[in-house]
Amino acid sequence: MSVRDEPLKQSPLGSEVEYADTYTPSLLHPIARADSRPSEVSHFFGEDLWHAYEFTWLNSRGKPQVAVLRIRVPCTSSHIIESKSMKLYLNSYTQTRFAEPREVRSTLESDLKVAVRAPVDVQMLTAEQLAEAPARLPGTCLDALDVAIEHYRPKPDLLAYASDAVTREVVYSHLFRSVCPVTGQPDWATIWIEYLGRELARESILEYLISYRRHEAFHEATVEQIFTELMTRCAPQELTVMGLFLRRGGVDINPYRSTQSGPAPVYRLPRQ
């Protein structure tokens, strides 16, 4: 398999491309994580949890088959996959025949492993299996808080303590927005945070998350920056940050970063 590792400006994102409908693994476009990660990154565990809702191929008799893909990419991989190239690659299965679903899965895992330079886990789900994922996040939604917003670029010094008491808290916001660094299109997400440490003022967390409204970065780097800024500014004993981004072109990406090892939890919010 041939996988390109070209500068981002040469990627399919934001460019007009032809859609292949026969298997073409060379469509995958890897990007080095180091190229998009913040300059200073705290140590963390985690993975990027992808869902691809529009995936189809043909069985040996030419009958279309469909599945929803759940793809887990470890955050330790040296590369990520540019999202439009992932969509183009997955679309290339459309008119390709496979004898068994397990052959489809093994092909996906093999190609993606080469692209990200790390083992990748792929699950092929039915619509019924997808519906089993919880649609509600644990914790407290911050969105009803009455806050005045003045900053729309990341501003970690907005974060403030509510008290010196050590607490475990789980909060989230649906108001998050950032911007694609290549196309300038908005990326909408729910950001979910769990921490153990000095109690943070909830209004300050919401103001901080909203300050990303004009921030330009890929999903993975955005979540890593939030994680790192929370660690640096607030020094919690434990911290988990997950971004549940809305799908675009049938694909959503949910980066998960934590001080605790283990797989990312699976949620599927109604707007995803």
Image (cartoon, rainbow, N blue to C red):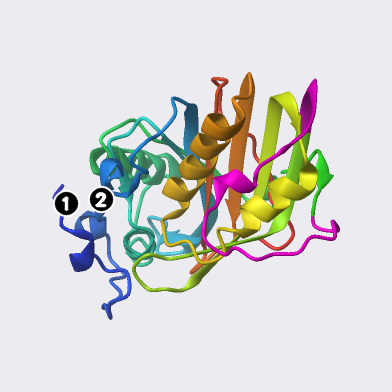
| Viewer-proximal residue among 211 and 131 | 211
Left or right: 85 as drawn, with respect to 162: left
Type of amino acid at the residue the image marks with label 1 = Asp
Image location of residue 10, percent across then percent down: 18, 66
| Location of mark 1 (residue) | 5
Corner quadrant of residue 194:
top right
**Does dot 2 land on a helix, a strand or a loop?**
strand
Q: Quadrant of the C terminus?
A: bottom right
Is residue 195 shown above or below 25?
above
Can residue 256 be seen from the camera position used here?
A: no
Q: Are marks 2 and 1 in contact (CB under 8 Å)?
A: yes
Residue 162 image label: none
Give the residue drawn at x 59%, y 48%. 243
For marks 2 and 1 on the same chain, the one whose residue lies earlier in the sequence = 1
| Few, some or many residues within 10 Å of mark 2 (<14, 14–19, 20+) | many
Left or right: 191 as drawn, with respect to 117: right
Q: CA distance from mark 2 to mark 1?
A: 5 Å
Give the residue drawn at x 37%, y 48%. 99
| Viewer-proximal residue among 106 and 69 | 69
| Location of mark 2 (residue) | 30
Image location of residue 239, percent across then percent down: 62, 28
Give the residue drawn at x 78%, y 44%. 202
Image location of residue 86, percent across then percent down: 36, 58
Type of amino acid at the residue the image marks with label 2 = Pro
Can residue 208 be seen from the camera position used here?
A: yes
Corner quadrant of residue 261:
top right
Q: Which residues are magenta?
A: 143-169
Left or right: 159 as drawn, with respect to 170: left
